[in-house]
Amino acid sequence: MYALVTLLRKELADHLGSKRFVILMALVSLSGLSAIYVAGQSIRQAVGDESTAQFVFLKLFTASSGVLPPFVSFIAFFGPLIGLALGFDAINRERSSGTLALVMAQPIFRDSIVNGKFLAGVTTIAVMLSSIVLIVAGMGLWMIGVPPSLEEVLRIIAYTLVTVVYIGFWMALAMMFSIFFKRITTSALAAIAVWMFFSLFMGIIAGLVADRISPIDQDQSDVSVAANEQTASNLMRLSPATLYQESIATMLQPNVRTLGPLTLQDIVGMVPGPLPLAQSLLLVWPQIVTMIGLMLACFAISYASFMRQEIRGP
């Protein structure tokens, strides 16, 4: 345990003191604060309207005036890049420089190395994201002058935790590639390729497969269109990006009562109004558990592979 704590502190110092961390923090903060400022201007003008008075503080994270995307969109885009940047050279960089062999020569267990790097990465992500969310919340409170309710605070905390898990998955994936590949460039390209596939090409593939499995008839009936959209939606849930988007949309928008396409039979009898936090969590609990499972699966593969590898000097 002492060796694990020592390695954790060392990795945290490397992350928090690196130029990479400063650049990523500055980039995300600048983008997020710009989106909050633009959205806050329009929200402040509508605070007195009763239709926008409920959950107005959450709108700081989701609203957009059309000039810039909302804050959550910036985090959804930059989040995976942060995770990939923290993990793509976690192991192979030290292997190529020879420091990994020197660490292994010390009286520490091998699993402490991979555990320390993973925990340090997750902690760095949590510190970075929590700082950005607190800065955004403070700026939003100053701009609109409306304090958040307890429900809104809990939803923002839930959003932060879900985002840490999502970014942690990409960090664990990049860390896995850094163990599989000896070259840093190869691991970085592999991680970026997976991110681009799920973020850009998954929607195209899901649409093509849905057209083959559940084609829309010539009359474009409601039943065939709904079946096609439902199939595409189910296929899109194979992407971690889709799971994350559905989770945060439900966390930050209490009026979201269901996910996926709706038919007229689904709408009939539905009671309008916001859901309590417990019901929102229950709605996206499968998505959250899946993201946690994906993160732990990537770490488990990394752990097993690292424990079996032979470590030699340069």
Image (spheres, grey):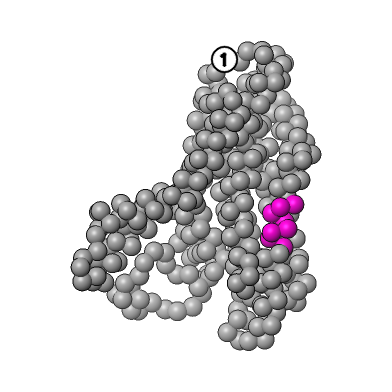
| Nearer to the camera, 303 or 79 | 79
Q: Position of residue 260 (x, y in %)?
A: 39, 64
Residue 59 in sight here = no
Q: Position of residue 239 (x, y in %)?
A: 44, 49
Comparing 27 with 243, the one in front is 27
Front residue of 178/4: it is 178
Please tell me whether the stretch drawn in magenta is mainly helix, strand or loop: helix
The residue tagged 1 is 310
Residue stretch rendered in magenta on the structure: 26-33
> Which residue is painted at 71% across and 52% down in the image?
27
* Numbered-mark total: 1
Figure quadrant of residue 216: bottom left
Residue 237 within the segment the image draws in magenta? no
Kindly state the secondary structure of the residue where label 1 is placed: loop
Graded by Cα atoms within 10 Å as few (under 14), some (14 to 19) or many (20 or more), the crowding at tag 1 reads: few
Residue at left offset 49%, top offset 50%: 199
Quadrant of the drawing holding the C terminus: top right
In this rendered view, identify the residue nearer to me: 59 or 70.
70
Quarter of the view holding residue 56: bottom right
Residue 49 appears in the rendering: yes
Amino acid type assigned to the residue bearing label 1 in the image = Glu
Q: Is residue 73 left or right of residue 210?
A: right
Residue 237 placement, left or right of 94: left
Q: Quadrant of residue 65?
A: bottom right
Left or right of residue 6: residue 86: left
Task: Work out whether 50 lies above or below 40.
Answer: below
Quarter holding the N terminus is top right
